[in-house]
Amino acid sequence: MYVDFDDPLGGNATPIHRKLVVPAVGGGQRVYMDPVARPFSELSAGDYLDTADLCRIFGISGRTIYRWINQAGLAPRLKAGREWLFTKSDLMNWYAANRPRPGRPPLGGR
């Protein structure tokens, strides 16, 4: 399998339902999902992703997403109800700065 290390998530075909955030009655915000799923690579930079989307994209658990938020600097764009939302551009920038690189790990901590 060929992996493009310059654009690792660019060709990702994971189906994602776009999110629309609107003001809710009585204050706060409400999130609506588009019924048609689109591949991750076709979403625009400002489209929102929730934690379940990130789990499907990276193949990890929700617990790992929350650990990334608390320890690895993954910053959600907003919180609507109980759900953290991220923009695609924020996710791509964070991943470019924190993704694993090919090669040997650094020799530290021995």
Image: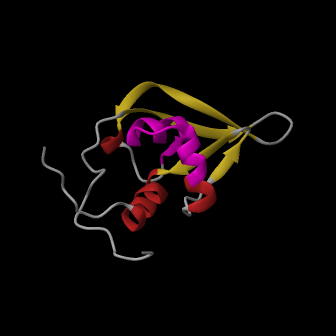
* Residue 76 visible in the shown view: no
Q: Main secondary structure of the magenta part?
A: helix
Residue that sits furthest to the top in the current view = 35
Q: Is residue 47 in sight in this rendering?
A: yes
Farthest front residue in view: 110
Query: Residue 23: x and y, percent?
Result: 73, 40
Instruction: Determine if the magenta segment contains residue 42.
Output: no
Q: Is residue 56 left or right of residue 105?
A: right
**Most foreground residue, 109 or 41:** 109
Extreme-left residue of the structure = 2
Q: Is residue 45 above or below residue 17?
A: below
Residue at the spot x=54%, y=29% of the render? 33
Magenta span of residues: 47-67
Nearest the camera: 80 or 55? 55
25 on left or right of 110: right
Along the line of sight, the residue nearer the viewer: 108 or 97: 108
Residue ID at (60%, 55%): 69
Residue under the point 48% across and 59% down: 90
